[in-house]
Amino acid sequence: MKIIYSRHAEEQLKERKLSKNLVSRILAKPDQVLAGQKGRRIAQAIVGEEGVEFLVRVVYEEEGDITEVVTVYRTTKIKKYWRNSNAN
């Protein structure tokens, strides 16, 4: 899988102090993958940092073996975005 980043994603990585290594790990082994808007997918994982749990969400599109990261962010609102296995 080849990962490329939109200009917006590059800016968000810098602004939010997230690494491409973290994004790669989440894309390779996400805790969950959800359907997003416009055919996009959202890979997410719970990450601990300085004793606080965050949900890191990676919004991406796939075309063949290329994955384009559209944006990435972290949030403490895990319950808002997490989907239980019995959810639609």
Image (cartoon, helix red, strand yellow):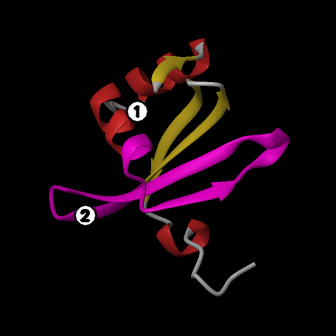
Query: Looking at numbered disc 2 in the image, what kind of residue is underneath it?
Result: Val
The crowd level at tag 2 (other Cα within 10 Å; few <14, some 14-19, many 20+) is few
Task: Give the residue at mark 2.
Answer: 52
Mark 1 or 2, nearer chain start: 1
Which residue appears at 42% of the width and 54% of the height?
30
**Where does the magenta region start and end?**
26-55
- Judging from the image, what secondary structure is the residue with disc 1 in? loop
- Judging from the image, what secondary structure is the residue with disc 2 in? strand
Which residue appears at 37% of the width and 51% of the height?
29
In this view, 15 is above or below 72:
above
Which residue occupies the foreground of this view, 65 or 72? Answer: 65
The crowd level at tag 1 (other Cα within 10 Å; few <14, some 14-19, many 20+) is few
Task: Give the residue at mark 1.
Answer: 16
Which residue occupies the foreground of this view, 83 or 18? Answer: 83
Give the quarter of the image for residue 23: top left
Asked if disc 1 and disc 2 are in contact, CB closer than 8 Å, the reply is no
Residue 62 position in % (x across, y down): 65, 31
